[in-house]
Image (cartoon, helix red, strand yellow):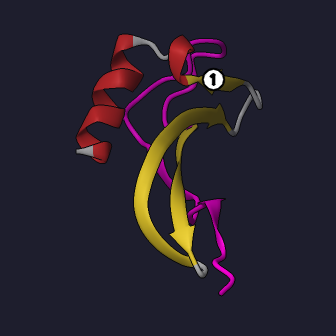
Amino acid sequence: MILFFGTRQGPREHIVLKNVKCPYCAQKGTLTLFKISNYVHLFWIRIFKINTQLFAECSHCKRYYDATEFTDEIKEASKRWTD
C-alpha cells in the first residue's frame, strides 16, 4: 500500500491594516498583512497545522517586513487578526 504523506502550504490569507502606518514611509493604510500556514497532509487532505508565518508589505514603498521586524502597532493589529 502506498501512502502519500507530506507537508504543504495552505491558502495565503491577507488583510489591509487601515489605521497602521508604514515604519519606513509613514503612509497610513498602505500595509497589507499576509498569513501563510503550513500543514501536514495525508493523501492531499490537511491533517493539522505545523506553523504559521506572518509578514507585511507596504503598497506605497514596496517595503517587506518579516514578523521579527514588526513594530508594536503592527504586532497589535496582527494579534487581533490571528486570534
Q: Quadrant of the N terminus?
A: bottom right
Q: Position of residue 50 (x, y in %)?
A: 46, 47
* Residue 3 lies within the magenta run: yes
Residue under label 1:
65
Q: Amino acid at mark 1?
A: Tyr
Q: Position of residue 63 (x, y in %)?
A: 73, 25
Based on the displayed image, in which of its 4 quarters is residue 60 positioned? Answer: top right
Based on the displayed image, in which of its 4 quarters is residue 78 positioned? Answer: top left
Q: Is residue 74 above or below residue 2?
A: above
Q: Is residue 50 above or below residue 21?
A: below
Left or right placement of residue 73 versus residue 14 in this view: left
Determine the residue positioned at 65% across, 33% down: 58
Based on the displayed image, in which of its 4 quarters is residue 25 positioned? Answer: top right
The residue closer to the viewer here, 62 or 10, is 10
The residue closer to the viewer here, 17 or 39, is 39
Determine the residue positioned at 44% across, 12% down: 71
Q: Is residue 64 above or below residue 36?
A: above
Label 1: how many residues lie within 10 Å, few (<14), some (14-19) or many (20+)?
some
Left or right placement of residue 81 versus residue 24 in this view: left
Q: Which residues are magenta?
A: 1-30
Determine the residue positioned at 77% across, 31% down: 62
Tell me the element at label 1.
strand
Q: Main secondary structure of the magenta part?
A: loop
Q: Position of residue 81 (x, y in %)?
A: 30, 45
Question: Exactly how many numbered labels are in the figure?
Answer: 1
Query: Residue pushed farthest right?
Result: 62
Determine the residue positioned at 22% across, 45% down: 83
